[in-house]
Amino acid sequence: MSWQDIYASPWQGVWGLVVVSALFLAWVAIAPRAAARGAEPAAAAFVRAWAVVFAIESICDATLPALAGVSMLPFVLLGDFRVFLLLEAVADPGRPLARHLLAAAAWTLFVPAVTAAVSLGWIAARGPLPGPVADVLAGATSSQALWLVYETAFVALATVLRQVVVPRRRPRASRYLRAVLAYVVAYYGLWALADVAILAGFDQGWLLRMLPNQLYYGLFVPFAYGLFFASTPPESAATSSRVQAAR
């Protein structure tokens, strides 16, 4: 049995991706609400609601396309939207929710637009995207190549947000937001590396792809939630340091 066969199996491609999200939802339901104010206290209530909504979305993302034949595209966009919505709401919690939703939607459409432009550019220059491209890269398919473009573009966008946009906006939770973006760069970068291996004909690329799948489907929401409430606003940390020094 190849790694591609294992990757496509239901236990890995469907059920194995929902375990962490399901456990997280159960924990949120039964655990007492944390008293921690979080990286940005004004956004704490939002982050709690965001975590529940997108943990449920992660389970639907992992199951509905495979079990009900639902298109993956809306879930791909929702998976990116959840990142941008979290960034917008935590960076500027004083704005109305509608503005956060619009800003997150605009960021979400950027990478698909880049991917579409690259695809159209390829078609204009060289004709339709290839099916099997044994002449170029063993085992490549047009969809796999497009995913690689998408993943690479998202890594570039998330890196710019982390290194340029967040520092310029100077939110109180900038360290938290940069950590979230580093996590996103990690899973999109691993996806890209896996797809390069797959396009080059290495079956082990499917094994590598299992890691970012878990980071994306199961672990992202618990990571973002846990890190938020484990973080302390800068002024709180400074106050705590002064109190300890006074003692």
Image (cartoon, rainbow, N blue to C red):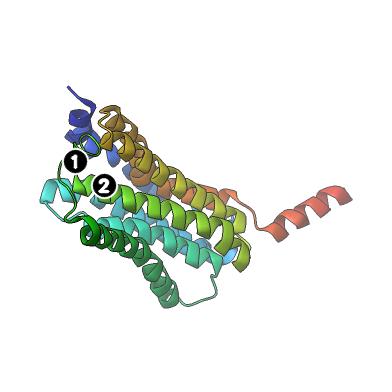
The reply to whether the C-beta atoms of the residues labelled 1 and 2 are less than 8 Å apart is yes
Image quadrant assignment for residue 102: bottom left
Q: Position of residue 100 (x, y in %)?
A: 44, 72
If you read the primary sequence from the N terminus, does the residue marked by circle 1 or circle 2 appear first? 1
| Coordinates of residue 111 in the picture (x, y in percent) | 36, 61
Q: Which residue has dot 2 on it?
A: 145
Identity of the amino acid at label 2? Ala
Q: Give the answer, above or below, for where 139 lies relative to 36.
A: above
Left or right of 140 in this view: 68: left
Quadrant into which the N terminus falls: top left
Q: Which mark is residue 227?
A: none
164, above or below 97, in the image: above
Residue drawn at x 55%, y 74% is: 94
Return the residue at label 1: 133
Quick one: label 2, few (<14), some, or many (20+) residues within 10 Å? many
The amino acid type of the residue labelled 1 equals Val
Q: Residue at x 39, y 42 (%)?
A: 215
Could you tell me how far apart the alpha carbons at marks 1 and 2 are, in whole angstroms?
A: 10 Å
